[in-house]
């Protein structure tokens, strides 16, 4: 059994085996398994994945301690084979260890790409994408089709991100058609799933020479395929700049990165770093937002009373507008408290990943009186947090009202650490503002324009509410739905 040094006072946790520790006990949904451990052993659990000391936490108090009070101690990321082969040896922002390289990349991200000014500059393109989404749904509704929600929501978020990133809607090498866009989206999604895998040789160095399940080969193949796309984009932008081509509208992110500064500037990035940042934006900004939208729509269909309340709020706020009464715009979002509460409830019950991106501790420390060794893998259990019965009543009930407070507006970021959709502290999501605009605008327009139902021949009770595992956790069964237009025909041509 686990050879623990009793005198070090590690947090409690399940007993494990020599060499493999608790690796084989994780099951197909490790966040659920670990949430169960937290219920059994307490809010801070220690286990061992092979030789990796691992901590998981699922209470607001512990999470606050890890991500706020001791933020710097837990601000690193573990090195993984997936990161090495699919993310340029962890050179991107999301997976880089806490070092000078990460600080530079993050600074560029926050100060030059995801700035408020740039977000405002791309507001028009976000509105156009939301308009297109409504028009697609309108066509589907008129034809009485059963709609593949994942496909359309995925297209919406990908287009919003790529228009900022590369100045056009689709990634692609030649034709930039729908097919290539879908291929690229699937590639990114598959890579995100793979980043969530606990790859045994990362934890059991003895097994480095084998490749269980062929993952290493897959990481390599996917890494090369993604790199081909990013290389093409950088080259295409360079060619455009050499030819002196001028592009309409705000400068896209790749142009910003290429133009940042000369060879000797501290902001100069080499091509690998530029490609790693492109990947950060695509990986960070697409599945996260579209899966949240899918979960939200799933809960609206399961809870028609909530859907009607969201719609009533939208109708009332839009009717009071002096101009553009028929159209939800980003400037209206601040007035939509119930919509925000419903999105927050979606984050509680279906967080974008079962864990945040794994953190790693950079020094020995104490948490709640327990010893946490340097180099521990820190798995913040957002799934367990949202279902923690010590924090929430009726955990399985979808009830946005739990976030409404007469004296305060609803904020997606929760100052009490009860819901942490964007993480917190040094590694918090730098795209939170963009993510929120994308989500609220897209969802608001979908609910204002349509009523939503399960496909013919099925009922609300048939909807599968389980998640699939990966770094992000989408519905296990992609959502299919039927839309019925709820406004005058002229509304949809305005869009
Ligand atoms: C609804 C949308 C989004 C959600 C729910 C979300 C959520 C998250 C979460 C939970 C983390 C990890 C925090 C941690 O490990 O402590 C994260 C990190 C990150 N996100 Fe987002 N995100 C969203 C949108 C975006 C967008 C639009 C972008 C950029 C275009 C983005 C870029 C990133 C990056 C680069 C990181 C890594 C930060 C670091 O490690 O320093 N995200 N996000």
Image: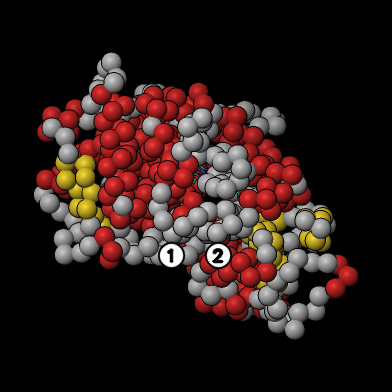
Placement of 232 over or under 128, stated as above or below: below
Residue 59 location, quadrant: bottom right
Residue sitting at the far right = 7
**In front: 179, or 147?**
147
Task: Classify residue 282 as left or right of residue 360.
Answer: left
**In front: 335, or 150?**
335
Few, some or many C-alpha atoms within 10 Å of disc 2 (few <14, some 14-19, many ≥20)?
many
Local secondary structure at mark 2: helix
Give the residue number, with chain letter if any, for mark 1.
468
**Which numbered dot is residue 428?**
none
> Closer to the N terminus: mark 2 or mark 1?
2
Q: Residue at x 40, y 65 (%)?
A: 466
Few, some or many C-alpha atoms within 10 Å of disc 1 (few <14, some 14-19, many ≥20)?
some
Q: Residue at x 69, y 40 (%)?
A: 103
Placement of 169 over or under 225, stated as above or below: above
Placement of 46 over or under 4, stated as above or below: above
Q: Residue at x 21, y 45 (%)?
A: 451
Local secondary structure at mark 1: loop
The mark lying in front, picked from 2 and 1, is 2
Q: Residue at x 64, y 28 (%)?
A: 262
The location of residue 109, given as percent across then percent down, is 58, 36
The location of residue 91, given as percent across then percent down, is 63, 49
Residue 179 appears in the picture as rendered: no
Image colouring: secondary structure
Give the residue number, with chain letter if any, for mark 2.
31
């Amino acid at each position: 059994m686990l050879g623990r040094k009793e005198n070090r006072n590690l947090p409690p946790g399940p007993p494990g085996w020599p060499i493999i520790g608790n690796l084989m006990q994780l099951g197909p949904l490790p966040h659920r398994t670990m949430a169960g451990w937290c219920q059994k052993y307490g809010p801070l659990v220690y286990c061992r994945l092979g030789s990796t000391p691992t901590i998981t936490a699922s209470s607001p108090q512990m999470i606050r301690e890890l991500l706020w009070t001791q933020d710097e101690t837990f601000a690193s990321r573990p090195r993984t084979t997936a990161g090495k082969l699919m993310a340029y040896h962890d050179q991107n922002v999301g997976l880089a260890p806490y070092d000078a390289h990460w600080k530079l990349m993050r600074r560029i991200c926050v100060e030059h790409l995801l700035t408020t000014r740039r977000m405002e500059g791309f507001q028009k393109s976000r509105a156009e994408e939301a308009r297109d989404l409504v028009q697609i749904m309108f066509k589907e509704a008129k034809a009485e089709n059963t709609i593949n929600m994942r496909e359309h929501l995925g297209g919406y978020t990908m287009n919003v991100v790529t228009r900022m990133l590369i100045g056009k809607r689709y990634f692609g090498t030649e034709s930039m058609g729908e097919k290539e866009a879908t291929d690229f989206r699937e590639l990114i999604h598959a890579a995100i799933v793979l980043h969530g895998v606990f790859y045994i040789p990362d934890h059991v160095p003895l097994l480095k020479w084998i490749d269980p399940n062929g993952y290493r080969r897959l990481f390599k193949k996917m890494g090369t395929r993604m790199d081909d796309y990013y290389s093409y984009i950088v080259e295409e932008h360079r060619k455009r700049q050499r030819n002196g081509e001028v592009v309409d509208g705000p400068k896209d992110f790749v142009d910003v990165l290429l133009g940042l500064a000369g060879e000797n500037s501290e902001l100069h990035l080499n091509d690998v770093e530029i490609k790693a940042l492109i990947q950060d934006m695509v990986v960070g900004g697409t599945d996260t937002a579209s899966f949240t939208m899918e979960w939200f729509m799933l809960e609206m269909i399961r809870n028609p009373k909530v859907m009607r309340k969201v719609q009533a709020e939208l109708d009332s706020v839009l009717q009071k507008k002096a101009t553009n009464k028929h159209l939800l715009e980003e400037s209206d979002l601040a007035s939509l408290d119930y919509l925000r509460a419903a999105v927050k409830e979606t984050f509680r019950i279906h967080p974008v990943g079962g864990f945040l991106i794994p953190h790693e501790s950079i020094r020995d420390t104490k948490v709640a009186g327990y010893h946490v060794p340097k180099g521990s893998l820190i798995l913040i259990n957002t799934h367990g947090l949202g279902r923690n019965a010590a924090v929430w009543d009726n955990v399985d009930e979808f009830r946005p009202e739990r976030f409404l407070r007469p004296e305060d507006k609803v904020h997606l970021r929760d100052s009490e650490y009860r819901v942490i959709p964007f993480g917190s502290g040094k590694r918090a999501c730098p795209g939170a503002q963009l993510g929120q605009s994308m989500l609220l605008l897209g969802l608001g327009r979908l609910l204002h324009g349509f009523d939503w139902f399960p496909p013919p021949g099925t009922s609300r009770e048939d909807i599968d509410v389980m998640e699939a595992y990966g770094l992000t956790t989408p519905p296990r069964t992609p959502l299919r739905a039927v839309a019925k237009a709820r406004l005058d025909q002229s509304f949809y041509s305005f869009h």
